[in-house]
Amino acid sequence: MKIKMYKVKQKFNSFYLENVESTVKQEIDKLNLKIKKGHRIAITAGSRGIDRIPLILRAAVEKVKELGGEPFLVPAMGSHGGATAEGQKKILCELGITPDFVGAPVLSSMEVVKVGTFSSDITENGKAAGFSVVIDKNAYEADGIVVINRVKPHTSFQSNIESGMMKMIAIGLGKRMQAENIHSFGTEGLRQFIAPVARKILETGKIIAGIGIVENAYDRVMEIKAFLPEDIEQGDMELLQKARKTMPKLPVDQLDILIVERLGKNISGTGMDTNVIGRMKIHGEPEPDKPAINRIIVLDLTPETKGNAYGIGLADFTTKALVEKIDYKATYTNAITSTFTERVKIPIVAENEEEAFEMAVKACGIRNPETLRAIRIKNTLQLVEIWVSSVVYNELQESG
């Protein structure tokens, strides 16, 4: 079935910070940090492709040096990078975060130090669920830690604390051990454990500052705010509300078919942002009411995801080309750690894009191509320029 597609441009809030480095330094200055000469300060670096993150980290490094400290970077990404020290260091390198660029060494290790214990209201075998609270060994042995992360809605649950500084403290700095402990309780673990576990780590006094980043719908940094440790949790909540309002989205809530050109961990933790596609695929969790999409086709993986196809199970159809690129070890490690195994189940595999589309149309029961409601996007991050079918195009024209 051949259908005509129209290229359209969506308009979102386009404000962004031109000079992120000066903003980072100004924000840190506001905190009046007491860093003594020679103090070793750990600065966290995550696995996400945040806009100009190498520059943001370099600015933090330079400011710590100005204050007399000796900064170094620690990968704070839970079990990402295959849950290995070298794998996590490699991810940073691929993001442009290298010792030469930021001006500080990268100390990568999966070793952790116990700093307390945690128990919750969730029961396990009749007893309150609990586990040791841990933190990256290199970070803990520093004289202070500066946590830097983007704040945005999570792709697996909704709460007043989602993806941000608190999550990086609890899961990122907790490495594989803590990531697995929290994820093992599914969405309830994420919803109920992130904040209290992060608080336990904050109580150690090791964290001296948090820096939250908010991006606009064009993936550009629009706000950077620094917080003292006692203000990190509240800051996370406030920035999350701002991030939620600026998120890009599809122009309509009802579709027969969504074609996603590429899926990848650099796009979203779930490969495709669940907030954009309206699918969670988590056992026991309700699916979002909108957008309501009948069939999703995903065509390929991003080069940056290195074969990690976590999120492939959110689609209904894919291509042989994509499946041949899957690194099953990385994909399954990610799935087992998150506990959301439905998200890595392989959908129907087509020989090519054309066959995938034909099968999706048939699965929708569409006989007249003129009635097909379809959209094609590059990925769930880039939603400014998209392709839409005639029905959707006419609808958008009428709505202005």
Image (cartoon, rainbow, N blue to C red):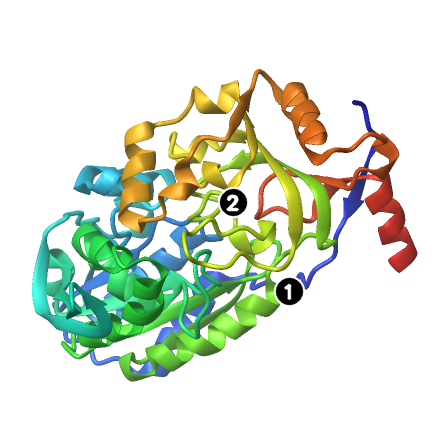
Residue 141 visible, this angle: no
Residue lying at 17% horizontally and 79% vertically, measured from the top left: 203
Question: First in sequence: mark 1 or mark 2?
Answer: 1
Quadrant assignment for the C terminus: bottom right
In the picture, measured across the screen, residue 213 lies left or right of residue 18, that is left
Q: CA distance from mark 1 to mark 2?
A: 24 Å
Residue lying at 61% horizontally and 46% vertically, measured from the top left: 382
In the picture, measured across the screen, residue 144 lies left or right of residue 216, that is left
Quadrant assignment for the N terminus: top right
Closer-to-camera residue (285/166): 285
Query: Percent x, y for residue 189?
Result: 30, 64
For label 1, the SS is: loop
For label 2, the SS is: loop
Query: Percent x, y for residue 175?
Result: 20, 53
User: In this picture, is 252 found above or below 327?
Assistant: below
Residue 51 visible, this angle: yes
Query: Percent x, y for residue 347?
Result: 50, 31
The kind of residue tagged 1 is Phe
Query: Percent x, y for residue 360?
Result: 66, 30
Residue 73 sits in quarter: bottom left
Residue 332 sits in quarter: top left
Residue that label 2 marks: 272
The kind of residue tagged 2 is Met
Task: Residue lying at the far front in this picture: please name it.
Answer: 126
Q: Total of numbered circles in the picture? A: 2
Task: Residue lying at the far top in this picture: please name it.
Answer: 351
Closer-to-camera residue (317/363): 363
Residue lying at 32% horizontally and 29% vertically, measured from the top left: 328
Residue lying at 27% horizontally and 39% vertically, measured from the top left: 333
Residue that label 1 marks: 15
